[in-house]
Image: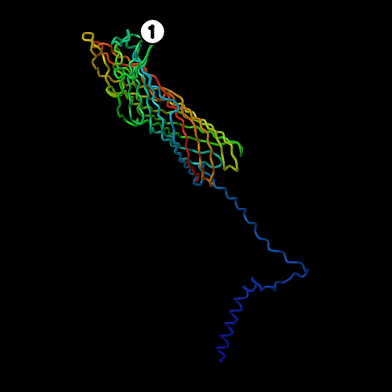
Amino acid sequence: MSWKRLVALSGLLLALAVLGLPTFAQEPPPGTEPKPATGEKPAEEVKPAEQAQPAEEAPKTHWWGDRFSLYIEANTGAASMARDIDTSISTSAQATSQSGLDIDALDHGRLAVGWKLPAERGMLQVMWTGYRETSYSFEAVGSEKFALLRIDGEITNQASRVEMVPWWNVFVEDGHLQARQSIPILEEDGTITYEYDNPDLNTTLENEIADTLQNNAQTLDLLYQREFGGRTFRGRWSAGLRFFSYQGTVPAAAWLNDADYGGIGYTEGTYIRLIPLAEKTSGIGPTGSMEAQYRLFRNRLTFYLQGRVAFVVQDLESDTGDFYTLVSSAADQQMYPVPSRLNESRDKTSWQVTAEAGVRWRILEGFQFELAGGQTSYQDCVLVPTSLLIPKLVQEAPRGTSALYNTRDFLVGSWRAGFSYQF
């Protein structure tokens, strides 16, 4: 190797040594740190105090919660009228009709959708309840203060004034109407008898009419509900707003004349049809409920009693459609038909009351079966005429027919069963 190469290599090594000294001085190899002469441990390097990190704030929970808390419920069942709708009508002091509608079968259902609030804040809920008629029966008895007089064992055509006695009986079931007229006989001793085996004094008529009257009632409740109490005995209250509607047809029977003609002019459903009252009612008002619960087996089984009331402002309408009344002529003692129609509407406040008892069984977490039965009274929601004011003579026909009205309750007893799920 020449001397020039040796000098260049020596200069390169020297340069590397000079540049590497600071690095070796700052980072001595392990185990080579110098120890103090006194034998004490070297003081540890004091690190600057770290700044305190502010604690992370807990995320705020929305009033309606941060998780999917939908509640759904579906129930189906059946119901029937707990009391007939009374459609009795008085035409005069001499002629009255007692009649009633019995809706003996209704479909019943309830649907609910809600949202459960966090931290035991309760639930917001929309609940629909409905009833729909599937079968009905109707009965009517037309009575007058007239009877045929029997003299010396013979029945005459002379009508005599007596106490109110039946002339017509009308019965409707499953769309089949049967009407029977039995003429009362005033015996010489003052008693009233009937000869049911005498075809001259008895008439039976039959007819097929509508097998459903399309009666239905439903409510829509917007509710806030909340629970309270302990683990075994608990309660639940709710408050909100109710929308109510009822519509359908209520038949009535009546005497359509105010003349002294025994047995003539009754709406027996064949030659003279029944009076169909088209009903329509809607209402709105506050509602609330209170429920008592008894829970068993770690809340898997719950027995409950519930009462609900609503105070609604109702708009009622009743329309008979076109029908004919009968007026008499003094000149020829004949009866003539006169077109008539009755339409009435009014506003009325009323109460709606429900009492219910049932059981709930939690099958899985959030999944529940419910079985319940109770009674509901929609008070004063049916508007019916109670007295007809009919012209008696042909000369009075232009004044038309009018009526006095009253309200009736829609009272049903029902049962239902269904499932609910809380997400």
- Residue 346's place in the image compared with 229, above or below, is above
Which residue occupies the foreground of this view, 8 or 307?
Answer: 307
Image side of residue 417 versus residue 120, left or right? left
In the displayed image of the protein, which residue is found farthest to the left? 332
Query: SS class of the residue under badge 1?
Result: loop
- Residue 234's place in the image compared with 332, above or below, is below
Kind of residue at badge 1: Asp
Which residue occupies the foreground of this view, 222 or 346?
Answer: 346
Position of the N terminus, as image quadrant, is bottom right
Which quadrant of the structure image shows residue 202?
Answer: top left
Q: Which residue is mark 1?
A: 189
Image side of residue 88 versus residue 240, left or right? left
How many numbered circles does the render carry? 1
Residue 164: image x %, image y %?
A: 37, 13
Residue 368: image x %, image y %?
A: 51, 43
In the displayed image of the protein, which residue is found farthest to the front? 153
Residue 218: image x %, image y %?
A: 41, 32
Which residue occupies the foreground of this view, 160 or 302?
Answer: 160
Image side of residue 137 versus residue 374, left or right? left
Which quadrant of the structure image shows residue 150?
Answer: top left
Task: Assess disc 1: are there few (<14), some (14-19) or many (≥20) residues with their C-alpha within 10 Å of its C-alpha.
Answer: few
Which residue occupies the foreground of this view, 104 or 407?
Answer: 104
Which quadrant of the structure image shows residue 81?
Answer: top left
